[in-house]
Image (cartoon, grey):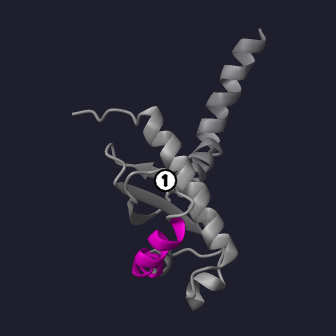
């Protein structure tokens, strides 16, 4: 069963939430020792079709394990919703935030490593030789 792609409205609201949340984290408005000393990148916000749930994908820079940061953000969800409400006042409902680790960087690194494997590089070089002829 395939999922429908997100609508333009979901994408637009997700990007608006991402910008507001990134600004909140950048200003250091959450008083948590773990969050204050770490730069957290909000890579994507996926909105539910009814715009009531925002799944926030984060990547704490310089740390391998994002779980402590996800727990810290989840524990401050009420504060985050309150601080973001002025920036998101045009929304009918303030979304509930669900924090998840962003694994896309790991996937990119794995694909890059595969492309640099000798047997793949050999095949890629072979394809380029055919195109030049």
Q: Nearer the viewer, residue 83 or 40?
A: 83
* Residue 61 appears anywhere in the view: no
The image shows residue 25 at horizontal and vertical percentages of: 62, 72
* 35 up-or-down from 9: above or below: below
Q: Which residue is pictured at 49% across the width and 46% down the height?
A: 13
The residue singled out by tag 1 in the image is: 45
- Answer yes or no: is residue 103 visible: yes
Answer whether residue 73 is magenta in the image. Answer: yes
Q: Is residue 35 above or below residue 25?
A: below
Q: Quadrant of the N terminus?
A: top left
Q: Residue at position x 56%, y 65% from top?
A: 59
Tally of numbered discs: 1
Helix, strand or loop at disc 1?
Answer: strand
Q: Residue at x 58, y 49 (%)?
A: 108
Tell me where residue 52 sits by quadrant: bottom left
List x then y, in percent, for residue 64: 56, 74
Residue 69, position as x, y percentages in the image: 50, 78
Residue range corresponding to the magenta coloring: 71-84
Q: Is residue 5 left or right of residue 15?
A: left
Residue 43, placed above or below residue 4: below
The single residue placed furthest to the top in the displayed view is 133
User: Residue 117, image x and y in percent?
Assistant: 62, 45
Q: Residue at x 47, y 33 (%)?
A: 8
Which secondary structure type mostly characterizes the magenta part of the structure?
A: helix
Please tell me which residue lies in front, 51 or 132.
51
Q: Quick one: quadrant of the C terminus?
A: top right
Left or right, 107 with reference to 41: left
Whether 114 is among the magenta residues is no
Q: Nearer the viewer, residue 46 or 92?
A: 92
């Amino acid at each position: 069963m395939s999922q429908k792609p997100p609508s333009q409205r979901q994408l637009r609201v997700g990007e608006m939430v991402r910008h507001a949340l990134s600004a909140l984290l950048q200003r250091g408005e959450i008083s948590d020792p773990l969050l204050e000393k770490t730069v957290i990148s909000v890579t994507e916000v996926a909105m539910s079709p009814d715009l009531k749930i925002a799944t926030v994908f984060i990547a704490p820079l310089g740390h391998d394990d994002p779980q402590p940061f996800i727990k810290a953000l989840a524990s401050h969800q009420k504060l985050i919703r309150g601080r973001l409400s002025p920036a998101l006042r045009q929304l009918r409902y303030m979304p509930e935030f669900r924090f998840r680790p962003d694994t896309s960087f790991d996937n990119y690194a794995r694909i890059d490593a595969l492309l640099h494997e000798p047997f793949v590089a050999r095949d890629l070089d072979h394809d380029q030789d055919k195109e030049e002829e």
